[in-house]
Amino acid sequence: MRNAQITAFAFAGALGALIPACGLDVPDLNNPSLDDLQNRPTAISIGAASTGLLIGNRRNHAAENGYVVQLGVLGREAYNFDAADPRYVSELLVKKLNQGSPFGGNFWALPYANIRGANIVLDAVDNVADLSAPDKAAIRGFAKTIEALDLLEVIVTHDVNGAVIDTDTNPLAELPMIVGKDATFDKIVSLLDTAIPDLAAGGASFPFVLSKGFAGFDTPETFATFNRAIRARVAAYRGDYSAVLSALADSFLDDTSVNLDFNAGVYYAYSTKPGDTPNALINPNIYVHPSVEADAQKDAMQNPDARLVRKTVKAKKPGSRGATLAFTKLYPNPESSVALIRNEELILLKAEALFFTGQVGPAVAELNIVRTGSGRLPALTGTPDSATFVDELLYERRYSLLFEGHRWIDVRRLNKLATLPIFVTMNDDGTTTPDTLNVRYPIPLAECDARPGEPACAKGSTD
């Protein structure tokens, strides 16, 4: 897929400019120059750039220092005991996130590089003479959706520290403002919602190739159901539960089939083919946090939650801090896919939205679809109050979406950060050092250096 990747550009605060990640001196129809794409776009170059947006969005999602690992460590789902880089423990767990490191400074430059690419595609597509009107509409709907995904990564990691949303401006001019969480979510919602009429006008197929992770969602019509699924997730993050239900109605949610497929959905695809990217989550340094096993519920026969059994296995050797399990059942090889969004999550989003719109019985019924079908646990009974339901919801989301990048976000948005276990280190002098609870990523140092006095730069990673 890399041969189809558009030249990447990074939004670098220290320079206030977009920096090419590779040279533009060798013409290549599969890797068009910025000048050609902006001023002489063709169906081939726009198609290659559109496919490149998928690669850019996937970027470091399943990298050792990527989204799933870092958020898994912060959410106490996982440990990474990489002896060559102790920051997986010392920074992500023991100390505050460092805005100048590749850990605390993460999830900013790369998403904005891809957002810049999406804006270039959106600006250029109407100037392509050899694309039909439906093809142009399909590309617009696709690019807006991918841009929304990239911006969502920025704001769910940085939370109240904010994000930049005015991204389609001259990068050599004055830097655009860092705005708050609400304004960022407004922008994401606008991108997702305005993509829908474009996709509706997009004809029967996309004029470019999508990855195998989009199988079943690779036409404008089916891709729109993926867009609505992401829209439902965003609405839940905002606590806008009527919007969750509305978006789910147009998504690929299936909670009624006799043989439900909890895994139906869209995935990040990986491979070991030359030029592609493997899944690095099979790293033997990555362990399951001991609390995941300790907190797993059991059925009447004392069998543990089937999701735990299905996704974890005893590690070849024990790790530090009491870790004994690995995720090699969940990600067994370098070509294992990583869920972007699945039907199982959609059912749980529906349960959450039903409860918080006053439909308690149906909400519990939706939880039980997942709990009994995926977890093989006894059904929940009774009429829970709000506190009880949140605990039940978080349990189901914890094991259904285990090590997919959700736990840390979930406990933060539902005001349950204090429930995350804190490991206490016994020092040689007899004193103890508890882990730090990092609740958001700081604005990266390079960005702050370019913005003297920026209020968002003073907030850091903890309350």
Image (cartoon, rainbow, N blue to C red):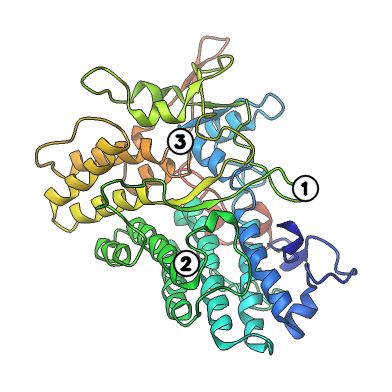
- Can you say whether 288 is above or below 144 in the image? above
Q: Quadrant of residue 388?
A: top left
| 228 left or right of 24 in image | left
Element type at mark 2: helix
Given contact means CB atoms under 8 Å apart, are the residues at marks 3 and 2 in contact?
no
The numbered mark, 3 or 1, whose residue comes first in the sequence reads: 1
Given contact means CB atoms under 8 Å apart, are the residues at marks 3 and 1 in contact?
no
Residue, disc 1: 274
Residue 77, horizontal then vertical, whole percent = 46, 32
Residue, disc 2: 223
Residue 45, horizontal then vertical, whole percent = 73, 75
| 299 left or right of 384 in image | right
Picture residue at 69% right of the left edge, 56% below the top: 446
View extreme (left): residue:
382
Q: Using a 10 Å C-alpha cutoff, classify the residue at mark 1 as few (fewer than 14 neighbours), some (14 to 19) or many (20 or more).
A: few
Element type at mark 1: loop
Q: Is residue 357 visible?
A: yes
Q: Is residue 451 visible?
A: no
Residue, disc 3: 437
Cα distance in 3D space between marks 3 and 2: 37 Å
Task: State how many labels appear.
Answer: 3
The numbered mark, 3 or 2, whose residue comes first in the sequence reads: 2
- Can you say whether 417 is above or below 284 in the image? below
Picture residue at 17% right of the left edge, 45% below the top: 364
Picture residue at 60% right of the left edge, 87% below the top: 132
